[in-house]
Image (cartoon, rainbow, N blue to C red):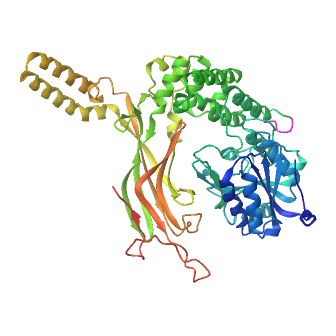
Amino acid sequence: MQTAEPPARQQPVKVSVVVPTHNTGGTVLTGLRSFLAQSMPRPDFEVIYVDDGSDDDTVALLENEIAEQGAGSTVRVVRAEHSGWPGRPRNIGTDLARGEFVHYVDDDDRLAPEALERLYARARETGADIVIGRTAGHGRQAPRALFEKPMTSCDLRTDTALLASMTVHKLFRRAFLREHRLRFPEGKVRLEDHMFTLRAFLLTDRVATVHDYTCYHWVRHTDGKHNVSYRTIEPGPYIDSIRRLLAILDAPDTCVPPGRHRNRLVAKWYGKKALDRISGKRLLDQPEDRRAEWVEAVGALASELPPEADTALPTRLRIVAALARHGDRALLEEQARFEAGVVHQPRVVSTRWREGQLTVRCSTSLIRRSGRGPGRRAVPLAFRRDGDRRVLRLPPRVAAVQAAAARADFSKAIRRSNVRGQLHHREGGTVLNLPTTWRVIEVPAGERARREGAVVRRLRSAGRRLARSVPRPLADTTAELCARLTARLPGARRGREDRCTLRFEAEFTVDPATADHGRPPAAGIWDLRFQLGCGGWRTSQPLPGHSIEVPEPDERTEEPPPHQVRPPRQRQEPRVTART
């Protein structure tokens, strides 16, 4: 390892930013420039780049930029032998850090201008060992619920909220890291950041958040070349990493006793990291041989866990867990094809501006698409009524597996659905959850059938009339075609009285003056979105054509004026763009 530390750099600083790099190329400068633009004075923080044996121009780009910016007293680059993973570079950077706190940043990410100042202030205010800044995802799904309210003393031993943020992009008290000998696993270890963060969360009850300012911009580049640990994921080693994570729950200093809370922790990795790999598109997008490897590896993990581990899984993954233990890959693939088409399609019912606030009413239903292309067929997801239970109608062969059928009860999942309006900052990536009232309405399949029955009867009658007016061979073909068309309509089928579909109706209000935790949101375009989560299916869909424009603050005054949504012609009234 090559490093040089000038004598002037021996004084302690408030924050050390540690960044592992490897063949990052030009995008590495985006992060560097975000560090040099921090509102925290430069003497108060340092940036340590640890290059993991790059063989491109990454180091040269950094050194040239540091020289041009005159940032040699703030930023340094350390060269290390290639390890192939970010764990060792982060450990090297931590050992060299002089800050009261250490903030880990990936080489392709960036910090917002006030990030270090706000994170440090929050740590000193709360006495926290770990501070998590609000995160915006760019091509990634960033946590949201964690930042809905201020948190000063989160504790993973009593609450699962922290499970939403298991990456290492946080501020850590350096004395806390030293006291507990917290180190990253070195070598090519998948989920090494989760292992580090899980141990850290279980060793303190002082985790705070910066909930009202987006500190971290988490970026995924489409070329897949900018992450130190970017590789094709091998099923066996990946599942072994999950085993290592679950073993942390049994370690002497981080032990979590058996019970409901432990099951909820286990579900984070058993469900979202293992079972989710053999469900829906994630399984179907794999080549044939890789599917078999994933099913075998995840099935082995499932067989090692007690059945009560399934109780904390989302309902749809309980079904997958039952199939994984059953061990039939064909059935898992059939269930994956069923799940891959499940989405929701929101529509705006009405919008209304009143006293500077926008109220939106919308509705959505869970549907399942089949086939390919834009014209593929979509039908509402059907449930069977069984007393107070609402049981998902599974594919027949999957439903024949008793353990899978027994786990298809969605009653609790429907009651606990996650339904909310959202604002998405088009330029900055921040997502704000909005207070939302909602209800779910069961639509009897029989009612739908009655509405479509008239269509069925008209089609059949038209088919008979057409058959009488054409030659016999063509008449037979016409009759067969009409029969096939009408048979596809739900109204043509019998025995639907015990079936229902679900419609979610919601209402939320946007106040542009207070939408970001009592303050105006950042200037720019904020698109309206509608999120639905039910039983483990969770997606956030845009409401096309509906957005709010927030102007820049008036620079002539010390305090920014109340933010209003500005239309192109009338600048005094709020505007919602609603194109249909």
Asked if residue 255 lies in the magenta stretch, the reply is yes
Q: Is residue 332 above or below residue 260?
A: above
The residue at the point 49 percent across, 38 percent down is 414
Q: Is residue 90 above or below residue 453?
A: below
Residue 553: percent from the left, percent from the top? Answer: 55, 75
Span highlighted in magenta in the image: 252-256
Q: Nearer the viewer, residue 28 or 459?
A: 28
577 to the left or right of 340: left
Q: How many marks?
A: 0
Residue 1: percent from the left, percent from the top? Answer: 87, 47
The single residue placed furthest to the left in the displayed view is 469
Q: Is residue 150 visible?
A: no
The residue at the point 61 percent across, 29 percent down is 275
360 to the left or right of 221: left
294 to the left or right of 87: left
Q: Is residue 54 above or below residue 372?
A: below
Residue 496: percent from the left, percent from the top? Answer: 33, 26
The residue at the point 91 percent across, 67 percent down is 8
Is the magenta region chiefly helix, strand or loop? Answer: loop
Q: Is residue 280 visible?
A: yes
Q: Nearer the viewer, residue 243 or 36?
A: 36
Residue 217: percent from the left, percent from the top? Answer: 64, 56
Asked if residue 118 lies in the magenta stretch, the reply is no
| Quarter of the rendering occupied by the C terminus | bottom left
